[in-house]
Image: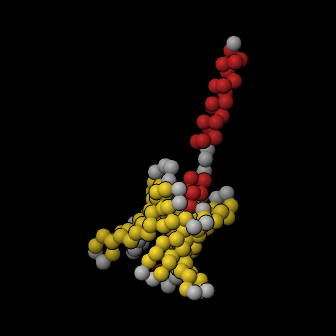
Amino acid sequence: MKTKFLLPVIGLLISGSWALQQSEIQKAEWLLGTWETKTSKGNLYETWVKKSNTELQGKSYYLNKKDTILFESVRLIEKNKQLHYIVSVKNHNNNLPVDFTLKLIKEPYSLIFENPKHDFPQTIVYKKVGKDSLFAEISGMMNGKIATQSFPMKKIQ
Protein backbone atom coordinates (compact mmCIF):
# COMPACT_ATOMS: atom_id res chain seq x y z
CA MET A 1 0.00 0.00 0.00
CA LYS A 2 2.80 2.44 0.91
CA THR A 3 4.57 1.67 -2.37
CA LYS A 4 1.46 2.45 -4.44
CA PHE A 5 1.16 5.81 -2.69
CA LEU A 6 4.88 6.63 -2.72
CA LEU A 7 5.44 6.25 -6.49
CA PRO A 8 2.88 8.89 -7.54
CA VAL A 9 4.22 11.28 -4.90
CA ILE A 10 7.78 10.86 -6.22
CA GLY A 11 6.50 11.42 -9.77
CA LEU A 12 4.81 14.66 -8.75
CA LEU A 13 7.94 15.89 -6.99
CA ILE A 14 10.10 15.15 -10.01
CA SER A 15 7.73 16.85 -12.47
CA GLY A 16 7.31 19.83 -10.13
CA SER A 17 11.06 20.27 -9.76
CA TRP A 18 11.47 20.15 -13.56
CA ALA A 19 8.96 22.98 -13.97
CA LEU A 20 10.87 25.04 -11.41
CA GLN A 21 14.12 24.40 -13.28
CA GLN A 22 12.83 25.80 -16.57
CA SER A 23 15.43 28.33 -17.66
CA GLU A 24 14.63 31.99 -18.16
CA ILE A 25 15.52 31.76 -21.85
CA GLN A 26 12.97 28.96 -22.33
CA LYS A 27 10.29 31.33 -21.05
CA ALA A 28 11.10 33.63 -23.98
CA GLU A 29 11.11 31.03 -26.76
CA TRP A 30 7.61 32.04 -27.82
CA LEU A 31 9.39 34.91 -29.61
CA LEU A 32 10.96 32.49 -32.13
CA GLY A 33 9.92 33.08 -35.73
CA THR A 34 9.35 36.10 -37.95
CA TRP A 35 6.98 38.91 -37.00
CA GLU A 36 5.75 41.83 -39.13
CA THR A 37 4.28 45.27 -38.50
CA LYS A 38 3.41 48.15 -40.78
CA THR A 39 5.06 51.50 -40.04
CA SER A 40 5.26 54.89 -41.76
CA LYS A 41 8.66 53.75 -43.13
CA GLY A 42 7.22 50.53 -44.56
CA ASN A 43 6.91 46.98 -43.28
CA LEU A 44 9.16 46.24 -40.32
CA TYR A 45 10.15 42.63 -39.66
CA GLU A 46 11.59 41.06 -36.54
CA THR A 47 13.09 37.57 -36.74
CA TRP A 48 14.14 35.48 -33.73
CA VAL A 49 16.22 32.28 -33.83
CA LYS A 50 17.58 30.03 -31.10
CA LYS A 51 21.39 30.08 -31.09
CA SER A 52 21.94 27.91 -28.00
CA ASN A 53 20.34 26.83 -24.74
CA THR A 54 21.23 30.23 -23.28
CA GLU A 55 20.80 32.58 -26.25
CA LEU A 56 18.18 33.77 -28.72
CA GLN A 57 19.15 36.18 -31.49
CA GLY A 58 16.87 38.68 -33.10
CA LYS A 59 17.07 41.23 -35.85
CA SER A 60 14.74 43.96 -37.00
CA TYR A 61 14.81 45.04 -40.61
CA TYR A 62 12.89 46.71 -43.40
CA LEU A 63 12.51 45.26 -46.88
CA ASN A 64 12.95 47.75 -49.70
CA LYS A 65 12.18 45.95 -52.95
CA LYS A 66 14.85 43.22 -52.88
CA ASP A 67 17.11 44.97 -50.35
CA THR A 68 17.13 44.13 -46.65
CA ILE A 69 17.86 47.19 -44.50
CA LEU A 70 19.00 46.12 -41.03
CA PHE A 71 17.56 48.31 -38.29
CA GLU A 72 18.80 46.57 -35.13
CA SER A 73 20.22 43.30 -33.86
CA VAL A 74 19.46 41.75 -30.48
CA ARG A 75 21.01 39.06 -28.33
CA LEU A 76 18.73 37.69 -25.63
CA ILE A 77 21.15 35.97 -23.27
CA GLU A 78 20.69 34.15 -20.00
CA LYS A 79 23.56 34.89 -17.59
CA ASN A 80 23.40 33.78 -13.94
CA LYS A 81 19.66 33.01 -14.26
CA GLN A 82 19.02 36.59 -15.48
CA LEU A 83 17.92 37.51 -19.00
CA HIS A 84 19.77 40.29 -20.81
CA TYR A 85 18.33 42.01 -23.88
CA ILE A 86 21.45 43.34 -25.60
CA VAL A 87 20.53 45.53 -28.55
CA SER A 88 22.61 47.26 -31.21
CA VAL A 89 20.75 49.88 -33.24
CA LYS A 90 22.21 51.14 -36.48
CA ASN A 91 23.55 54.72 -36.17
CA HIS A 92 22.74 54.97 -32.43
CA ASN A 93 24.99 54.86 -29.36
CA ASN A 94 28.06 54.85 -31.64
CA ASN A 95 26.80 51.44 -32.85
CA LEU A 96 27.66 49.97 -29.42
CA PRO A 97 25.27 47.47 -27.81
CA VAL A 98 23.02 48.51 -24.91
CA ASP A 99 22.15 46.01 -22.17
CA PHE A 100 18.62 45.86 -20.75
CA THR A 101 17.96 43.39 -17.94
CA LEU A 102 14.78 41.49 -17.39
CA LYS A 103 12.68 43.28 -14.81
CA LEU A 104 9.66 41.00 -14.91
CA ILE A 105 8.19 37.97 -16.64
CA LYS A 106 4.43 37.96 -16.45
CA GLU A 107 3.76 34.38 -17.35
CA PRO A 108 3.12 32.94 -19.67
CA TYR A 109 3.84 35.51 -22.39
CA SER A 110 5.07 38.91 -21.25
CA LEU A 111 8.65 40.17 -20.91
CA ILE A 112 9.68 43.54 -19.48
CA PHE A 113 13.29 44.73 -19.79
CA GLU A 114 14.76 47.88 -18.25
CA ASN A 115 17.84 50.06 -18.39
CA PRO A 116 17.07 53.26 -16.43
CA LYS A 117 20.46 54.78 -17.39
CA HIS A 118 19.83 54.61 -21.15
CA ASP A 119 18.73 57.80 -22.93
CA PHE A 120 15.75 56.26 -24.77
CA PRO A 121 14.13 53.88 -24.36
CA GLN A 122 14.48 52.83 -20.74
CA THR A 123 11.86 50.06 -20.96
CA ILE A 124 11.23 47.40 -23.62
CA VAL A 125 8.11 45.23 -23.42
CA TYR A 126 7.04 42.17 -25.40
CA LYS A 127 3.57 40.69 -24.87
CA LYS A 128 2.09 37.79 -26.77
CA VAL A 129 -1.54 38.69 -27.34
CA GLY A 130 -2.68 35.77 -29.47
CA LYS A 131 -1.48 32.65 -31.23
CA ASP A 132 0.05 34.69 -34.03
CA SER A 133 0.36 38.21 -32.64
CA LEU A 134 2.46 40.15 -30.19
CA PHE A 135 2.65 43.69 -28.91
CA ALA A 136 6.09 45.28 -28.53
CA GLU A 137 6.59 48.66 -26.90
CA ILE A 138 9.52 50.91 -26.07
CA SER A 139 9.10 53.73 -23.58
CA GLY A 140 10.87 56.15 -21.31
CA MET A 141 11.81 59.76 -20.86
CA MET A 142 12.73 61.73 -23.99
CA ASN A 143 13.39 65.46 -23.85
CA GLY A 144 11.88 65.63 -20.37
CA LYS A 145 8.62 63.92 -21.37
CA ILE A 146 7.40 60.34 -21.27
CA ALA A 147 7.44 58.87 -24.77
CA THR A 148 6.13 55.55 -26.06
CA GLN A 149 6.37 53.73 -29.39
CA SER A 150 4.17 50.69 -29.98
CA PHE A 151 4.63 47.88 -32.47
CA PRO A 152 1.68 45.48 -32.88
CA MET A 153 3.06 42.51 -34.82
CA LYS A 154 1.71 39.46 -36.61
CA LYS A 155 3.65 36.22 -36.90
CA ILE A 156 4.30 35.35 -40.54
CA GLN A 157 6.64 32.35 -40.05
* Lateral position of residue 69 relative to residue 42, left or right: right
Place residue 68 in its image quadrant.
bottom right
* Lateral position of residue 73 relative to residue 10, left or right: left
Place residue 135 in its image quadrant.
bottom left
| Residue 111: image location, x then y, percent | 48, 57
Q: Residue at x 28, y 74 (%)?
A: 144
Place residue 151 in its image quadrant.
bottom left
Q: Residue at x 55, y 71 (%)?
A: 46
| Residue 106: image location, x then y, percent | 46, 51
* Lateral position of residue 75 relative to residue 103, left or right: right
Q: Nearer the viewer, residue 27 or 123?
A: 27
Q: Residue at x 64, y 65 (%)?
A: 49
Q: Is residue 110 visible from the viewing direction of this image?
A: yes
Q: Nearer the viewer, residue 69 or 7?
A: 69
User: In the image, is residue 82 above or below residue 92?
Assistant: above
- Quarter of the image with the N terminus is top right
| Residue 148: image location, x then y, percent | 36, 70
User: In the image, is residue 81 above or below residue 98?
Assistant: above
Q: Is residue 88 visible from the viewing direction of this image?
A: no
User: In the image, is residue 53 above or below residue 122?
Assistant: above
Q: How many marks?
A: 0
